[in-house]
């Protein structure tokens, strides 16, 4: 292992996750924190901590110069970006390297290539990976967009090339909606992502979101099979599983091989995910994007394969060749992750930060709780509402669901509203237990449950 100390340019549960991986590898940790995170669990657990400015992320976690300078001054020899914030910013990766440190992730060029969702579509198509029918590149203007619209028909999606986190996507069902949405989408993309580039995709209606985890060191590549992430609200994942259920063997093989081919095509170095939409009727799958970072739902893959993905990232960044071969990676049982957010499902999921008064964490075999919580901790208002994740493993999906029901029953977080009760309801729902859901399911289910 060549990395000696890692600067963690993130916060919350993923910072805690990275600290644990570093500790296991004997790597010193330096935690970045904003004024709002001075008492965070990550700051408590890290060997060292450095203040990087005020609570609002634009002035701290999103400020490249501030973060790189703090990392450099801390003496760290590497920077782990986590997810969100600067994790998929190629300029950040370049700045870390320019300051003489290692970026724990692919290089800036790979991030730019794959992080631009239009460029990634092109690379995928060239690597022989099926993509969603739509515009070939960015649509130059509304006239060029109309040509694509005529070709693919409705409903369609107008998507921001630089979008992410479920933002920057609009659906048009007819030409009038299209004419209204398109200029709005361009303005919103420019304001949100600093890039007004748009592309168009056909809506794949009854689809499931299935994604493949891969690892590569620039020479050797493996996949760690797939995750099922169809339970989404506002195009953000809420509940994830591994592996995907009822996936025919040849579809799994084709999807996983596609992901590896794509990673290899760009000499990718690190951990990444290729996201697909999967049509369970036709068994067709379509590339949607690549995430060039660790993902929120990575523990489900760790539970079923035994591969520690964060440790693998750190080892690859440290220059070690990939130590695991494809034939050593096997699927064992089933895992489910529930994202626990500080949101009130009864009040349209309004984020409601507050202080954790009581915390009781479920225990027992095959239960994992990755969180930022402790009793007395006050959740700051500035950031994403993710508090943590409950991940449960079982020999098959039914046992996993039963174990999840028990674990969610034990999990008690008092003092602020959370999505725990929503997950309890989901574990009892016949569509969930019966594996009858796609990406459209959860929105309708929420309407029926909470807005009668
Ligand atoms: P994952 O892809 O890991 O399953 P998400 O899509 O929910 O998870 O994204 C992970 C985190 O990164 C979330 O906090 C999300 O809000 C944030 N995020 C990802 N991309 C962007 C982006 N382009 N702009 C803003 N936030 C983003
Ligand atoms: P983000 O970068 O925000 O994660 P994605 O392109 O990955 O955006 O899409 C997020 C989600 O939106 C997908 O998981 C899926 O549920 C839905 N989605 C995206 N593209 C399509 C499409 N062409 N047809 C149907 N649903 C889609
Ligand atoms: Mg996505």
Image (tube, rainbow, N blue to C red):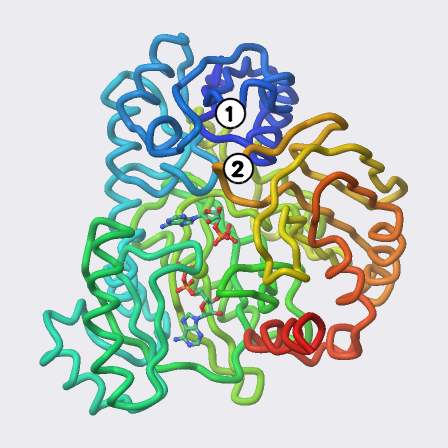
Q: Earlier along the polypeptide chain: callout 1 or callout 2?
A: 1
Instruction: Tell me the residue that label 1 is attached to.
Output: 36
SS at mark 1 in the image: helix
The residue closer to the viewer here, 280 or 349, is 349
Q: Which mark is residue 154?
A: none
Q: Is residue 8 left or right of residue 288?
A: right
Q: Quadrant of residue 148?
A: bottom left
Q: Residue tagged by mark 2?
A: 381
Q: In what element is the residue under mark 2? A: loop
Q: Residues within 10 Å of mark 1 (few under 14, many from 20)?
A: some
- Residue 428, x across and y down, in percent: 83, 70
**Viewer-proximal residue, 247 or 343?**
343
Residue at 78% over, 51% down = 392
- Considering only vertical position in the picture, is 341 above or below 401? above
Asked whether residue 328 appears in the rendered view, the answer is: no
Q: Is residue 53 left or right of residue 377?
A: left
Indicate left or right for 289 with 116 as reference.
right
| Residue at 60% in and 15% down | 26
**Do the CB atoms of the residues marked 1 and 2 lie less than 8 Å apart?**
yes
Q: Residues within 10 Å of mark 2 (few under 14, many from 20)?
A: some
Image coordinates of residue 137 in percent, x first then y, are: 18, 69
Q: Image point 47% across, 73% down: which residue?
A: 277
Image quadrant for the C terminus? Answer: bottom right
- Is the residue at mark 2 in contact range of ligand 1, meaning its CB lies under 8 Å from it? no
Q: Is residue 215 above or below residue 207?
A: above
Decide which of 249, 199 is in the foreground and name it.
199
The residue sitting at 51% across, 44% down in the picture is 384
Q: Quadrant of residue 44?
A: top right
């Amino acid at each position: 292992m060549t990395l000696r100390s890692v600067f963690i340019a993130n916060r919350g549960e993923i910072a805690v996750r990275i600290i644990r991986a570093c500790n296991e590898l004997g790597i010193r940790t330096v935690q970045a924190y904003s004024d709002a995170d001075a008492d965070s669990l990550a700051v408590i657990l890290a060997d060292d901590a450095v203040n990087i400015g005020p609570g609002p992320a634009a002035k701290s976690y999103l400020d490249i110069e501030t973060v790189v300078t703090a990392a450099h001054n801390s003496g760290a020899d590497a920077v782990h970006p986590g997810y969100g914030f600067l994790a998929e910013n190629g300029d950040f990766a370049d700045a870390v390297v320019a300051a003489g440190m290692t970026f724990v992730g692919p290089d800036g060029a790979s991030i730019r290539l794959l992080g631009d969702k239009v460029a990634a579509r092109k690379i995928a198509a060239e690597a022989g990976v099926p993509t969603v029918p739509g515009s070939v590149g960015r649509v130059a203007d509304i006239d060029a967009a109309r040509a694509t619209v005529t070709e693919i028909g409705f409903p369609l999606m107008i998507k921001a090339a630089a979008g992410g986190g479920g933002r920057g996507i609009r659906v048009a069902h007819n030409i009038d909606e299209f004419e209204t949405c398109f200029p709005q989408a361009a303005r919103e993309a420019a304001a949100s992502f600093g890039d007004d580039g748009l592309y168009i995709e056909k809506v794949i209606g009854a689809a499931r979101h299935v994604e493949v985890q891969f690892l590569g060191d620039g020479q050797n590549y493996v996949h760690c099979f797939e995750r099922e992430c169809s339970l989404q609200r506002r195009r953000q994942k809420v509940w994830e599983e591994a592996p995907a259920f009822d996936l025919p063997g040849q579809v799994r093989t084709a999807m996983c091989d596609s992901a590896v081919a794509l990673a290899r095509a760009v000499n990718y170095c690190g951990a990444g995910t290729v996201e697909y939409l999967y049509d369970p009727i036709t068994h067709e799958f379509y590339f949607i994007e690549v995430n060039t970072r660790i993902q929120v739902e990575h523990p489900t893959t760790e539970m079923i394969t035994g591969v520690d993905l964060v440790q693998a990232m750190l080892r690859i960044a440290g220059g070690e060749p990939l130590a695991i071969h494809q034939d050593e990676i096997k699927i064992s049982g089933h895992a489910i992750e529930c994202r626990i957010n500080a949101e009130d499902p009864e009040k349209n999921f309004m984020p409601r930060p507050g202080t954790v008064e009581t915390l009781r964490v479920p225990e027992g075999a095959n239960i994992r709780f990755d969180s930022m919580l402790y009793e007395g901790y006050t959740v700051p208002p500035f950031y994403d509402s993710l508090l943590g994740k409950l991940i449960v493993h079982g020999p098959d999906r039914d046992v996993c669901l039963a174990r999840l029901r028990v674990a969610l029953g034990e999990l008690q977080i008092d003092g602020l509203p959370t999505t725990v009760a929503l997950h309890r309801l989901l574990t009892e729902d016949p569509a969930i237990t019966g594996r009858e859901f796609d990406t459209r399911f959860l929105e309708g289910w929420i309407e029926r449950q909470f807005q009668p």
